[in-house]
């Protein structure tokens, strides 16, 4: 075996703390839910430097990517030739928090009609102790991203957490992901977030209001556009480092991708096109709107759009595909093949 190893920084710098308190060393979907432990049942040391964390780091050092079958970020991998694996890590620099599912709208691909928000993601006796439980995780944190699973501005738990983290850990910068409806100047100021936002992501799944209304049930397109313009003014004034719009690609909205790209260029944002994730229980809706499936009747139209002049991947269009955004990669390449392509010596 080669004495060269591939190093991935994520299991040393990133902790995703997700519903029910499970901790992942990378994007949960990419590593197929390999949890390191649970913040409500185990201590920080038991999780972050426990057996499962060491096993994950050891496997990567051994060039064994079996725990990373859905990796979408091969660019961050580096070649190293360290004689020993580094199995113990400092506390993470970046924490992604997704502890509360509460939301003020229902997007059709996230909250189907029969979807019930689970009120028990945080044990009742732990709600008041959240900051205490999270403190060892935050001790080295530079960035906190929230809320990955619900709506940050609508969730009291998320809002209180942001306020308390900002006071106790004044050096932390926030990465906010929101549906944009309540992302107003007033609400940003009320959370003391002015000058503390490193990245703002607003999900806007349509260029046209009528399309938005088909996807975001109970939303408010005009408010989102006003708030996007406000965030754009912050970005243009250099007050936030990164600004992105998220656009989950479906058969309902894909024709608006070129207009969305133009909009993003005008507001100084990147656009991130998300492949539809079927892990939620979407039943027949999924097959109907999953245009990334080459068997979908409109699949070739989507491919044409990805070849249009507006579409320049890598510059300001980012693809986040799960396994599903196959339009740009009609020939499926395995993870190991991608690695070989990236690191020609392997
Ligand atoms: C779950 S939301 C939470 C943050 C915030 N409420 C929002 O909408 O941006 C995070 C992102 O996941 C995306 N999303 C939700 N359900 C999805 C699905 N089934 N497939 C792909 N992306 C999805 C949303 O579009 C959003 O950009
Ligand atoms: S190799 Fe990919 S999936 Fe695995 S930890 Fe690194 S970035 Fe995550
Ligand atoms: S706004 Fe975000 S959390 Fe709420 S339903 Fe839509 S995607 Fe899900």
Image (cartoon, rainbow, N blue to C red):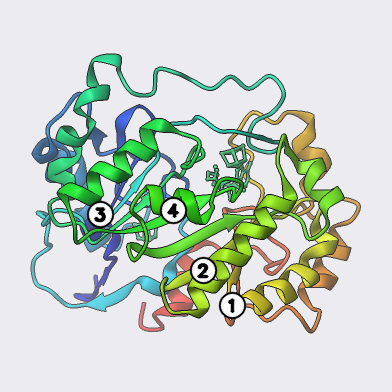
| Residue 188: mark | 4
Q: Image point 23% across, 31% down: which residue?
A: 130
Q: Position of residue 231 (x, y in %)?
A: 54, 65
- Give 90 or 327, whichever is nearer the viewer: 90
What residue did someone put label 3 on?
Answer: 59
Q: Earlier in the sequence, mark 3 or mark 2?
A: 3
Secondary element at image label 2: strand
**Mark 4 Cα-neighbour bin, 10 Å: few <14, some 14–19, many ≥20:** some
Q: Which residue is mark 1?
A: 268
Which residue is depicted at the point 37% across and 61% down? Answer: 194
Q: Are marks 2 and 4 in contact (CB under 8 Å)?
A: no
Looking at the figure, which quarter contains the N terminus? bottom left
> Mark on residue 333?
none
Q: Secondary structure at mark 3?
A: helix
Distance (Cα) linking label 1 and label 3: 40 Å
Find the distance from the CA under tag 3 to the CA under tag 4: 42 Å
Q: Is residue 333 visible?
A: no
């Amino acid at each position: 075996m080669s004495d060269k190893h591939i190093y991935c920084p994520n299991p040393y710098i990133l902790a995703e703390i997700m519903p029910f308190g499970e901790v992942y060393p990378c994007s949960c979907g990419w590593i197929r839910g390999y949890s390191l432990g649970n913040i409500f049942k185990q201590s920080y040391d038991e999780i972050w430097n426990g057996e499962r964390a060491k096993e994950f780091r050891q496997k990567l050092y051994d060039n064994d990517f079996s725990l990373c079958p859905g990796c979408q970020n091969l660019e961050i991998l580096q070649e190293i030739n360290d004689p020993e694996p580094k199995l113990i890590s400092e506390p993470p620099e970046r924490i992604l928090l997704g502890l509360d599912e509460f939301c003020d709208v229902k997007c059709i691909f996230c909250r189907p009609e029969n979807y019930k928000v689970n009120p028990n993601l945080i044990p009742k006796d732990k709600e008041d102790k959240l900051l205490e439980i999270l403190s060892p995780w935050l001790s080295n944190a530079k960035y906190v991203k929230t809320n990955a699973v619900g709506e940050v501005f609508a969730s009291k738990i998320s809002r209180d957490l942001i306020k308390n983290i900002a006071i106790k850990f004044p050096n932390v910068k926030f990465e906010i992901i929101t549906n944009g409806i309540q992302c107003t100047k007033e609400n940003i100021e009320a959370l003391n977030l002015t000058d503390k936002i490193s990245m703002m992501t607003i999900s806007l799944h349509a260029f046209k209001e009528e399309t938005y209304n088909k996807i975001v049930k109970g939303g408010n397109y005009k408010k989102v556009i006003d708030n996007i313009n406000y965030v754009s003014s912050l970005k243009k004034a250099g007050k936030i480092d990164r600004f992105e719009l998220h656009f989950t690609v479906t058969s309902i909205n894909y024709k608006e991708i070129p207009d969305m790209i133009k909009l993003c260029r005008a507001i100084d944002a990147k656009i991130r096109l998300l492949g539809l994730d079927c892990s939620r229980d979407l039943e027949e809706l999924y097959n109907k709107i999953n245009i990334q499936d080459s068997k979908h009747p409109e699949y070739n139209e989507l491919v044409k759009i990805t070849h249009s002049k507006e579409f320049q991947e890598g510059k300001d269009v980012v693809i986040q595909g799960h396994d599903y955004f196959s339009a740009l990669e009609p020939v499926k390449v395995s993870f190991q093949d991608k690695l070989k392509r990236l690191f020609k010596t392997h």
